[in-house]
Amino acid sequence: MKNNNRVWDFFASVRLAIFTLCALALTSIIGTIIPQNKPGNWYVETYGAATAQFFQILDIPDMYGSWWFLLLLGLLSANLIICSIDRFPAAWRLINADQLAVAADRLRGMSFRENWSSAGPIQQNAAALSTALEKAGWRPTSRETGNGILIFSGKGAWSRLGVYVVHVSILIIFGGAIIGNFLGYKGTVMLPEKNSTDKVFASDTSEPIDLGFEVECDAFTVDFYPNGMPKEYQSVLIVKEQGKEVRRETIEVNKPMTHRGVTFYQSSYQAYQDFLVSIVVEPDRTGKVFTIPYQREMEWPEKQLRFGIVNAEGTGDRATRLKIWLKDGEQPASTFWLDNNQQTSIPSAGRSFTISAKQMYATGLQVAKDPGVWLVYLGCCLMLVGLYIAFFLSHQRIWILLEQEQGGASTNVLCAAASSKNKSGFTRTFTNLTDQLRGR
């Protein structure tokens, strides 16, 4: 009934598989050439109003999430499932078939076959050939037939399942991608130094997403080339749960941090016109860090201390030297220059101040959660295994039919073989094996 069902035959056909694979390859090329998830006005400015409207109709800006791309994936999935259901029973029967029940006429019609005559009774020749097969790495079994003895040995029967392993791996990859799409997210956040957040903003909708924990940027550093271009930058992130620090890690480009399935990638930064000033009062070693706007006075009342950044030197939005104004109670005010992110000691009446100052930055983080990624990894590993089995292994079978010749002084030997693939390579295997069996 299944074979007469046209709908079943359509979804089980190789033509459908070829069509969906080609369509997916072509559309993936389009999705690579045309930037995805850009603002609508970007497509208008780049391609023109008419083309941009055409793109919107076909969901080209979000092609991988469009209804027709998901339909192609659904067609491929249905094709893989139904094709596997349709063809798997035949493969399973071949794996578990009684190979000693094969007819002699079938052996005589195989393309790989060789005949010879061997002296001695049939039982003696059967034992010798079985031993030779074992020495050659085969595991023979035998059975007496109506007019002789049939020996069989096979290798790689399970290689017939390689293609189904590939099918399953693709479905697992699709399943992981679906889980990641519906239960995961991609977001961004610009987090100033010494600030924390428990939310990020979705990359496509800018909607806030709750992290389930708090992340703080404890410090940010950036190194520059002599021409002023950024060389490398990194952030020190602190993860807090219920107000307690549970993790501290330094991240940089291509070195992300993952916590509870959420991965933080260092992607960008932003320089502020605010400064972080750290002051340690000696000899009691009392310290505090202040965020100071440019050319604004800050006060530390407990220490009767006033200070501020009155001038700065730098290139572009990067400050390299800072001029600091400091007044200790009724003592005369002092001003001094300090390189960015350096420290100095300033003496005062009966005490001294260790001061460090740096320009304040915000770290730009890309945040991703993909609970299906491990399924994707599993699917990829299975695919590699399945492809190796499908392309490099084959089901090889050897039959040896022994029939006693008239008079009983010698035995007629027919050696036949079959291979599911790589027949040219199996030709050498068969020739070498028959040479060993004949004692050449």
Image (tube, rainbow, N blue to C red):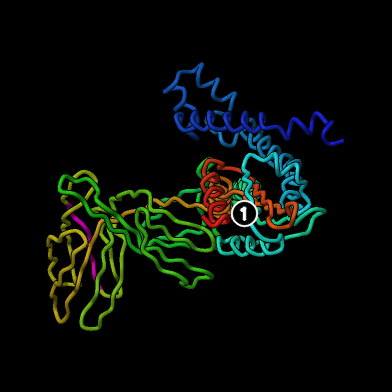
Compared to 275, does 185 lie above or below? above
Compared to residue 263, the image places residue 352 above or below, namely below
Q: Residues within 10 Å of mark 1 (few under 14, many from 20)?
A: some
Is residue 185 shown to the viewer in this render? Answer: no
Range drawn in magenta: 304-312
Dot 1 falls on a residue whose secondary structure is loop
Q: Is residue 25 visible?
A: yes
Outermost residue, front side: 407
Task: Find the residue positioned furthest to the right.
Answer: 1
Drawn side of residue 45 relative to residue 163, left or right = left
- Taking 16 as reference, is 311 above or below it? below
The main secondary structure of the magenta stretch is: strand
Task: Write down the residue under mark 1.
Answer: 156
> Could you tell me the amino acid type at mark 1?
Gly
User: Picture coordinates of residue 262 (x, y %)?
Assistant: 51, 58
Q: Is residue 212 left or right of residue 234?
A: right
Q: Please say whether residue 190 is one of the residues in the magenta stretch.
A: no
Q: 81 left or right of 223?
A: right
User: Depth check: 434 or 278 in front?
Assistant: 434
Quadrant of the image for the N terminus? top right
Instruction: From the viewer's side, name the closer residue of 319 and 40.
Output: 40
